[in-house]
Image: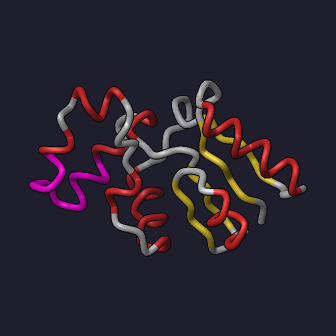
Amino acid sequence: MALTVLCYKKCSTCQRALKWLDEKGIDYRERPIREERPTAEELRAWYQQSGLPLKRFFNTSGSLYKELKLKERLPGMSEEEQLALLATDGMLVKRPLVVGNGVVLTGFKEAEWEEKL
């Protein structure tokens, strides 16, 4: 199964990540995160599979994260509430988000991608 890369076209980090995948010859399907935002069910499965803290799935540097004051609000929210919130808007989700081949990666860290992909 090929990788699915949830990304936002205007995001420079996403552009670098896709270029890296192309250079490595890694097959992937691009999924626009705003238009085809992940569902709470998908996010729950990826979160459980990843072993990462749920906070790693949030785009903490995004304007929506700041507008909603999530830095203050998240600690008081349950996992289910956080997953439901993430599913409301793709711009809340850390990107690129890579899923597939038993791998879930949030953000683009070249060393981590090199090791896992």
Task: Residue 102: name its quadrant.
Answer: bottom right
Q: Nearer the viewer, residue 16 or 76?
A: 16
Q: Is residue 37 above or below residue 117?
A: above
- Residue at horizontal 40 percent and vertical 42 percent from the top: 59
Horizontal side of 34 relative to 62 (left or right) equals: right
Position of the C terminus by quadrant:
bottom right
Coloring scheme of the render?
secondary structure
Q: Is residue 63 above or below residue 55?
A: above
Q: Main secondary structure of the magenta part?
A: helix
In magenta segment, residue 79 = yes
Residue 16: x percent and y percent?
70, 40
Horizontal side of 115 relative to 57 (left or right) equals: right
- Residue at horizontal 48 percent and vertical 71 percent from the top: 50
Task: Residue 86: name its quadrant.
Answer: top left
Q: How many marks?
A: 0
Outermost residue to the left: 76
- Residue at horizontal 24 percent and vertical 61 percent from the top: 79
- Residue at horizontal 38 percent and vertical 32 percent from the top: 62
Read off the magenta span: 73-84
Residue 81: x percent and y percent?
21, 52
Residue 41: x percent and y percent?
42, 58
Q: Nearer the viewer, residue 87 or 25?
A: 25
Position of the N terminus by quadrant:
bottom right
Horizontal side of 42 relative to 72 (left or right) equals: right
Q: Is residue 62 above or below residue 5?
A: above
Horizontal side of 54 relative to 33 (left or right) equals: left
Q: Is residue 107 above or below residue 112?
A: above
In magenta segment, residue 39 = no
Residue 114: x percent and y percent?
72, 66
Q: Nearer the viewer, residue 39 or 117?
A: 117
